[in-house]
Image: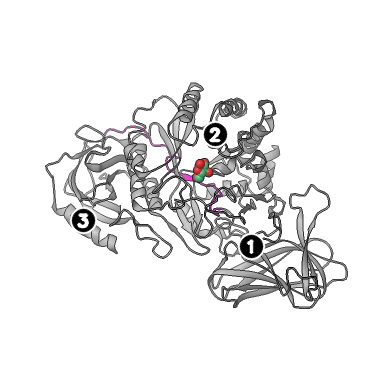
Amino acid sequence: MRNRILLFAFGLLSLTSFAQPNQPLVVKIDRPAAEIAPTMWGIFFEDINFAADGGLYAELVKNRSFEFYKPLMGWKEEGSERFSMNSQSGYTTIIIRGDGTSSNPRFARVNVLADQGYGLSNEGFRGMGIKQGIDYRFSIMASQHSGGNVSVRIELKDEKGNVIGSSRISPAGTEWKKYSTSLKASATSTKSSLTLWFEGRGTLDIDMVSLFPGDTWKNRPGGLRADLVQLLADMKPGFLRFPGGCIVEGHELATRYQWKKTIGNVEDREVMINRWNREFTHRPTPDYFQSFGLGFFEYFQLAEDIGAEPLPILSCGLACQFNSAEVVPLDQLDPYIQDALDLIEFANGPAESQWGKVRIAMGHPEPFNLKMIGVGNEQWGPQYIERYALFVKAIKAKYPSIKIVTSTGPFPDGELFDYANAELRAMNAEIIDEHYYREPNWFFENTKRYDNYDRNGPKIFAGEYAAQSVATVSPDNKNNWLCALSEAAFMTGLERNAEVVTMCSYAPLFAHVDGWQWTPDLIWFDNLRSYGTPNYYVQKLFATNKGTYVLPLAMGNASITGQDKLYASSVFDKVNNEIIIKIVNASDKPQVKEIALEGKAKINPKASLIVLTSESMDTVNSLDDPKRISPVEQPLNLKGKKFGVTLAPASLSVVKVRLAK
Ligand code: AHR
């Protein structure tokens, strides 16, 4: 509401005040400049902050296959003393499958001593989000021991212990089989739990205990959380980078992300400790593991669903250099390179190919049309360059049209950056990923960063950026309006330089309010709700107003890069036949500006103005006030191609003017 009042006041000004004595913003509407890559504004996904397990992947049961390093982590025995020798009701032991090769080696053996008294309950990912009226799909792998007749009563309980859904399964026979049922929730609760009550007598082996909401994205069984995917889809992203981030590299090589272990049946995907589990002492998350239920097939499918080009990033044989920095000797790099080649085949290969066949068996006969791949995440030094060169040689030999993304490391300047930048340019790299986690001022001051980059050199992927309100990796960082505004100013510089910059993504993407390790993040959620930060709305405004090519925009012949605390860029959108001007007013005063659209084309007088602003630089959005800072649109009735606009203090304004038919 506050936004609306402000906007109303400034809107009135915009209609009444006209040319001020200051210089106009001149847009040359007949002078198309650089094309804007369709991939320009995209998404960076990493399983950090419970982004996958506990977040986007809608599984509600934590440690469903008893593979966490403490096998009963997330589980609690009901009706039995954990450390008692004399349980009257029952007890659970953890069994290791004998062959030593299983990717799902453990299961739970439930010994039921007294009918109805013994159970196992699962706490979910900091609780389970349950919605009234929704069907929840329960499944379990079970095998009855000979002579036993154990059945399972399944109960969903809210945080007060009230039963809000129940069902039953009755496993039969000693063969492992999957049993499924569904429970309709009678109430809504953010922190529910699931209890399995074992009834009858005997011993039941169980594994892969699973509960999914019925209302996943596209109602896919075992699918993704619909509200979170919707927030991504609403951004109309040009690409979707996956799976990270440092998670690609692993704390050590053994825990690097290996795509082949993330496809096929979910029960065969090997659970692994998440590298963010123990990364920060300020946010330890001992219950953070990767089930890979959201694996590479689901990733490609998600990218396709939301119309984004997939950009997988793979290990280059170097573990995270902030951690172990383990490195694979050059003469042993082949399996890593083969992984990259096989991934391209998995995404694009025909039915006759080894990996194309696997994709088709998983339910996607058409290729995913993968066009690019990243080698290494945020590596540095000669050890990276040597390995990158071998990947390029092999990938280009087999797939010459696949574009390869490389990286200049974790910092946007300094020795590591300069070394990698020079080497990669000398090697004619195609797309270079640059990362900037810096204070807001850095973003305001770097809007000209790409003005002098070589137009004929590699394209730039601004692959990870986020203004840090306190300091990089400080747990006190906030997604406040100052940070979002500084990013918007910087992004006008990215857009102005679309000739060089072809891909950009904020990072990280998701954070669970009770399970995060890193802040700031683009989208926050709890078990039921989610919201976009002010930074999200900045990203969304740029991405949904991307345009087709850049239009020259100047104030007194100079690009608008901080004069009067203004930052601006403009584009033309061929699909909507529309001129789009983005202006950041970083001052604390309203500024009345004249905009002059120079050129022959006639305009439609019915234009619009979208404003994103806040009364304070410290304002944040939250679960309880998710749209406190969000775009507000109003019509603009133009009298001609010169018109006045009042730019609210501390605002991002998007002016949209259609050409007349
Ligand atoms: O986005 C969080 C981390 O920041 C990423 O994993 C890494 O690439 C960068 O250092």
Task: Say whether residue 239 is visible.
Answer: yes
Instruction: Please state, as top left, top right, bottom left or bottom right, where the C terminus lies in the image.
Output: top left
User: As displayed, is residue 344 above or below residue 4?
Assistant: above
Q: Quadrant of residue 630?
A: bottom left
Residue at image position (65%, 42%) is 258
Of the residues tagged 1 and 2, which is closer to the observer?
2
In this view, the residue in front, 263 or 308, is 263
User: As displayed, is residue 172 above or below residue 421?
Assistant: below
Instruction: Please state, as top left, top right, bottom left or bottom right, where the N terminus lies in the image.
Output: bottom left
In this view, the residue in front, 616 or 578, is 616
Can you identify the residue that label 1 sits on? 61
Residue 243: % across, % down: 57, 44
Q: Tags 3 and 2 in contact by the CB under 8 Å rule?
A: no
Q: Residues within 10 Å of mark 1 (few under 14, many from 20)?
A: many
Residue 493: % across, % down: 34, 37
Residue 518: % across, % down: 49, 50
Q: Is residue 342 left or right of residue 639?
A: right
Q: Which residues are magenta?
A: 30-51
Of the residues tagged 3 and 2, which is closer to the observer?
2
User: As displayed, is residue 26 above or below residue 180?
Assistant: above
Residue 295 lies in the magenta-colored region: no
Q: CA distance from mark 3 to mark 1?
A: 50 Å
Q: Which label sits on residue 379?
A: 2
Residue 387: % across, % down: 60, 28
Q: Quadrant of residue 85?
A: bottom right
Can you identify the residue that label 3 sits on? 11
